[in-house]
Structures are given as C-alpha cells and as structure tokens.
Amino acid sequence: NTKITQSPRYLILGRANKSLECEQHLGHNAMYWYKQSAEKPPELMFLYNLKQLIRNETVPSRFIPECPDSSKLLLHISAVDPEDSAVYFCASSQYGNSGNTLYFGEGSRLIVV
Amino acid sequence: GDQVEQSPSALSLHEGTDSALRCNFTTTMRSVQWFRQNSRGSLISLFYLASGTKENGRLKSAFDSKERRYSTLHIRDAQLEDSGTYFCAAEAPNTDKVVFGTGTRLQVSP
C-alpha cells in the first residue's frame, strides 16, 4: 500500500521523544490515528477533518497530534511508557464523518524498552 | 457506549469449505466495514456497506437493512491465503466514530 505511507515502520525507544509521520495520497480530507495493542482491535486516538481536530479520545497527554495540511499527519510522543508499545496506524477517508471507507497505512510498530 | 460484538472469536477451516462471520451491534449503526489483517499486520479493507449486500469473488457481506443491528461476512471455498484476523468496524448515527469489533482469527489449513 503506497497510498498511505507511514514512517518510521519500526521504532524502539527508551523514555525518549519521537514523532510518527503519515502522508496520504488519496485526496482525502479526514485523517486518523489508531492504536492497536497486541491481540486487540484498533482503537481511535485522534480524528482530523480538514486539518481541524474533531475527535480526541481519552489519550495520555504525552501523545500530541499535528496536522500541518490535509494530506499529512504527525503524532508526537514524549517520554514514552511501556504501555505505549503497540502498532500505530494512520488512516484516511473522504469525509471526517459518516458514510465513508477507511483506508489504513501499514502502521508504525513502537517498542518501548 | 456503542459496542460491536463479533463472533466467533476464532475459527479453523479446511480448504474448500464455507463459513460465516458475524457482527452484532448493541445499537443501530449507520454503516459497517470489514477488514482482514494479515500476518504482516496490514489492515485490508474488504467491504464497506451502508445497506444491503456486496460480493467480491469468494467473499460476500451483508448488512441488515431493516434494523441495522448486525452484519455478516461469508467466505466460500476457503483458501490458505484467507487466513488472518477479520474485523468489522461500525459507525453509529450522528457520530464520526468508527468502533471495531474484537476480531475473528481465521486459520485455513490444507
């Protein structure tokens, strides 16, 4: 899947700061961050529509999203915790609300040591 | 809150057999999307339905158009490459949140 690219794909961190990046080439106006922990379904963290944050789930404050334009999404992580070990998926859709197909990137696997 | 109950949680099939996965919703949903997550962890969209049925090759999905409280995914003539974890994800009315089911882990063997 080259339509939604995420980087880095793998990340091993101690208690450091890092940013995950996502870019979509689908012309969508909504972008999402999902977290998938081991043996669990993906869970929504943040949703942007037209660069505006419109949904912010219960996420620790060390996760800060940024949407510099409608095709790019960042997730800044500070002082990671072992419970943050997971795969972080970026997704996009044509609209921010209702009735549209979600497309996922390949994910960024974060391992906290 | 809105819940998506998916069954079965795990399923083993022999090649060539048929089966069905199901998602029940605790409330009326606006739409449902089915995904397969492969061994590399990629989430692949299979179907998006706002109503009715859709078919693609050996896969067919249906969304209860009347009460909008369940959806099914039928797999016909299962193949080894169908192995993976299948998720349904549903969107409630008047919300922009998509909630995932807990997944069905499918293993197809020769």
Image (tube, coloured by chain):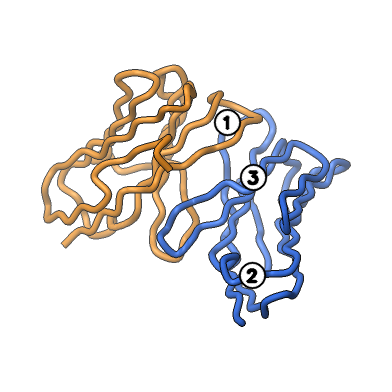
| Mark 2 / mark 3, whichever is N-terminal | 3
Distance between the alpha carbons at the discs numbered 1 and 2: 35 Å
Residue A86 position in % (x across, y down): 33, 56
Vertical comparison of A67 with B42: above or below: above
Q: Is A85 left, or right, of B74 in this rendering?
A: left
Q: Is B80 left, or right, of B75 in this rendering?
A: left
Q: Which mark is residue B79?
A: 2
Identify the chain of the residue marked 1, using the numbered disc in the image: B
Mark 3 residue element:
strand
Q: Which chain is blue?
A: B
Kind of residue indicated by mark 2: Gln
- Quarter of the figure that contains the N terminus of chain A: top left
Crowding at dot 2, Cα within 10 Å, few <14 / some 14-19 / many 20+, comes out as some
Identify the chain of the residue marked 2, using the numbered disc in the image: B
| Residue sitting at x 12%, y 56% | A14
| Residue sitting at x 74%, y 75% | B17
Residue contact between numbered discs 1 and 3, judged by CB atoms under 8 Å: no
Mark 2 residue element:
loop
Kind of residue indicated by mark 3: Gln
Kind of residue indicated by mark 1: Asp
Residue B33 position in % (x across, y down): 64, 45
| Mark 1 / mark 3, whichever is N-terminal | 3
Q: Is A51 left, or right, of A18 in this rendering?
A: right
| Residue sitting at x 38%, y 23% | A71
Badge 3 is on which residue?
Answer: B33
Q: Is B57 left, or right, of A91 in this rendering?
A: right
Badge 1 is on which residue?
Answer: B96
